[in-house]
Amino acid sequence: MTQTKNPHVLETEPIGKLLVQYSIPAIIGMTVTSVYNIIDSIFIGHGVGPLAISGLALTFPLMNLVIAFSTLIGVGGAAISSIYLGQRDDHKATEVLHNVLLLCIITGFCFGGLALYFLDGILVFFGASSETLPYARSFMQVILMGNPISFVFLGLNNVMRATGYPKKAMLSSLLTVGINIILAPVFIFHFQWGIRGAAMATIFSQICGLAWVLNHFIRPSSFIHFKRGYYQLKGRVIGSIFSIGMAPFLLNVCTSAIVIILNHSFKDYGGDLAIGAYGIVNRVAIFFVMVVIGLTQGMQPIVGYNFGARHFDRVQQTLKKVIVVAVTIMSVGWLLCELLPGHIVALFSDDSRLNELARVGLRITMVAFPLVGAQLVITNFFQSIGRAKISIFLSLARQLFFLIPLLLILPRIWHIDGVWGSMPLSDTIAFLAAVLTLRWYLRKVKREP
């Protein structure tokens, strides 16, 4: 997000103007990752085949775990470095930067090495069959060998954003997407490297992004940069990083578990192609979700500042505006998927069976999407005002308390349609839980002196 020269304008400037100023860079930063994944899926679907789409979908839980560990370090490090900079303690902020670098390198090698060693067993556990395993294995072997690069890039990019360079962080994400768009078709179609070529394009693009980020932190002109004497891990710093990064880490781990259950459900009731269909639906849904998450990131400083200043009228005004915008964004997604499902899934593959499964799944899954917009905003609202426990509860409740029971019940009745239907139904229940929690909390705040 961009930063104003004087943070006190957060209590005086019009809410709409502030939302545009803070949200646009965050939205761009969040959506480039979705575009990144969509492009890979499109090239793989048309360049390799429908089973390759299924193989790619099987890697989602492992990719989520990669994101979980990099988020644990990167988000925690970013938050701690911001706090130290606010305290005018450049020394401790520099300590955090070096600890993030070392943790990313160590964790990247350890996680990548262990996952490579047990890769086939992991992928079979995730739902791979004899037909889809070669595709998933070929993709993840390359990704895991480049795991340290991914970890360091993601971790340092978070710190760069938090230490006063949000536009640079956004540009590094755009750079990786642009290079991936160029390299993926060359590697897949020209060199005939198949799904392994898509993975290589991803790693090469992240190498370029990492070079950009390292160049920033090497320069003495950067506010926080690499220095001699700081390259050592410190328990105090690591503990602070992990304590803040634990919440998003647990959410990503939980997401991985849910995807594993979904993969097995789709495999049992629809076969390997049903897993590929879910992979397509997931890519489309995540694109719109990421736009809303970017919007909520822009909301956070506005809500947090005014909540701390006890300007509750501006807090509620911001919340209402963001909910309206989020619901509008998700409604557009819902309309597109209801009116043009065939055209959307055809972007990913020309296999008629896969496209039919994805078309039906897309229409069912997106039924409650407008409600998801409001639920995401409310969940992030509680995080913005420092009520992390409520935010985590609302996030986990959708997956653990609502979705898992529905996945155990509905497919027994409606088979594969029951698997698809469990997702919008759990979204609806999660929306109701979020609204009721918000109403309870706002009444509680009004009663306080």
Image (cartoon, grey):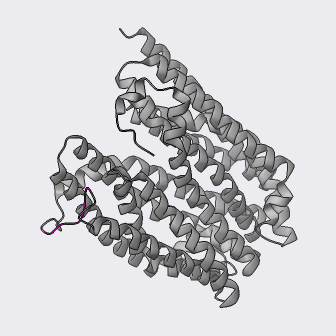
Q: Is residue 262 magenta?
A: no
Q: Residue 256, relative to residue 177: is it above or below?
A: above
Q: Position of residue 397 (x, y in %)?
A: 54, 39
- The residue sitting at 53% across, 32% down in the picture is 17
Quadrant for residue 72, please give it.
bottom left
Main SS of residues in magenta: loop
Residue 231 position by quadrant: bottom left
125 left or right of 420 in image: left
Chain part drawn in magenta: 223-228
Q: Nearer the viewer, residue 98 or 170?
A: 170
Q: Nearer the viewer, residue 397 or 296?
A: 296
Pinpoint residue 30: horizontal percent, then vertical percent: 54, 53
66 or 216: which is nearer to us?
216
Residue at the spot 45% in from the left edge and 11% down from the top edge = 446
Q: Is residue 112 visible?
A: yes
Report the side of 129 relative to 221 (left or right): right
**In the image as oriented, which residue stretches furthest toward the bottom?**
191
Residue 426 at x, y percent in the picture: 65, 40
Indicate the quadrant containing the C terminus: top left, top right, bottom left or bottom right: top left
Q: Quadrant of residue 283?
A: bottom right
Residue 226: say if magenta.
yes
Residue for point 34% across, 70% down: 215
Can residue 404 be seen from the camera position used here? no
Tell me which residue sits at (70%, 46%) in the image: 422
Position above or below: 185 against 4: below
